[in-house]
Image: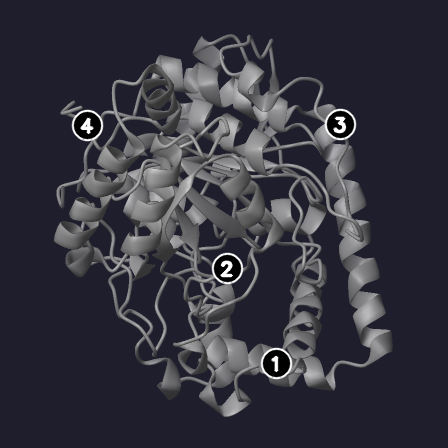
Amino acid sequence: MGTTIDPFTSATELAGMLRGGTVSATELAELYLARIDELNPKLDAYLTVCADEALAAATAVDRGETTGPFAGVPISIKDLNDTRGVRTTHGTAEWSERIPDRDDAVVARIRAAGFVILGKTNTPEFGKKSISENPAYPPARNPWDVGRTPGGSSGGAAAALAAGLCPISQGSDGGGSIRIPASLCGVFGLKPSRGRVSTHPRLADPHAIDGPITRTVADAAALLDAISGSEVGDEWTAPPPERPFADEVGRDPGRLRVALTVAPFINDVDVSDDAVAATRDAAELLESLGHTVTEAAPPWDNVVAEQVVNVFAVNAAANASEPGFPSIESLDVPSRVLVTMGQGVTATAYIAARRAVHALSVEAHRFLEDYDVLLTPTVPIPPLPVGAFDDNDQLSEWDALLRSRALAAYTPIANLIGAPAVSVPLAWDGDGLPIGIHFVAGMHREGLLLRLSSQLEDARPWKDRRPPVT
């Protein structure tokens, strides 16, 4: 067809072009595979590129053998999600040649929507760090400054999207792992409500969920529509939305009650002046759009919040007990610490931790009955240099574990309470690095966040910004 395509075109626009016949699925696959070939050596956003599989899938779309709302649109999949027939390492050394024989439920839904999978994006081992680095594979790099991290654990997904190595990315978020990389890479990230997207066949984690990382709010809404839903046996499910999430984009959010805080939810964390200034600037923008902003913060108890480590640790130990799991000695420090901790947590301590976190969650949800959204910075500091944690072996394992979460000063609250949250790319600092703004809404109120984010996107557009590496 010979149409010249901007690789930064949104996924929904590309889907329309494919339906209209102005571009073929094969042309799109070839475009992004060529960009990956050119730029991935600088970024290591992808750990695995499945060029042959992508071209075969694109050919099937062009022949009319594959349908769906996104038939022919390329996508990246995070390497924490199993993909049938495609190498899936989970960022761990002993799984460097692991090829699953089935898809995770979210991947199956992505395939059913017609997407063409380009490859698997970089992640820290089992998603346990807020940077996308591990000893087994090259570190992911930020396209705004290749000497810095794109964040984690969906760092490769956000870097690939920001650099135009795919038009849309799938990520997952257990403590900020979608929103942190979205903030550091200047794109939009959405963590859905607990139960909105099935984790099948993995044992459900009360804090982690899959979601979209996109260039536009419309893309995030459309991908959320595609991946939402439950599977038989899911421990948590979310009620169906009032209307398709795609229909929320462009709707008036109404006059919202916004609670603003720049105080981090984790003790002894420094917050940069740029992060504070960008967040307060966002508050002024909200007021100019007719919303009411009040300085207020939900109840937060660091002692209780720290107990969630027991929950994470028990989950890690349970995973490590499964047949075929890598040897504990081969694991990176955060993974190894969590597994060994979890093996020592008694059932009583585990239940006590779950109860403490639940009590905190109840109070936070009551707070969100008085306010429509909570506004904070997404991350407290600019992206760290690649290799900033290379001296972890010189620290105690516990200190190394805590340090690995250095960027997660604001985002975990949404995971602990199961609420939806977004990072909106509204600001850039004096060095040209993106600063995301974080919004949390009440349970199952993704529609509200999409309406608000769409309004902000119209007021302060970001999709045409291009990182230097491109």
What residue is pinned by disc 2? 84
Q: Are marks 2 and 1 in contact (CB under 8 Å)?
A: no
Q: Earlier in the sequence, mark 1 or mark 3?
A: 1
- Whole-angstrom CA distance, mark 2 to mark 4, is 30 Å
Residue 30 lies, with reference to residue 42, above or below; the image says above
Mark 2: give few (<14), some (14-19) or many (20+) Cα within 10 Å. some
First-in-chain label (3 vs 2): 2
User: Image quarter for residue 444?
Assistant: top right
The kind of residue tagged 1 is: Val
In this view, the residue farthest toward the bottom is: 329
Disc 1 marks which residue? Answer: 339
Label 1 CA crowd tier, 10 Å (few <14, some 14–19, many 20+): many
Residue 6's label in the rendered image is 4
Q: Amino acid at mark 4?
A: Asp
Measured as percent of width and height from the top left, residue 92 is found at 43, 76
Residue 260 shows in the view: no
Q: Earlier in the sequence, mark 2 or mark 4?
A: 4
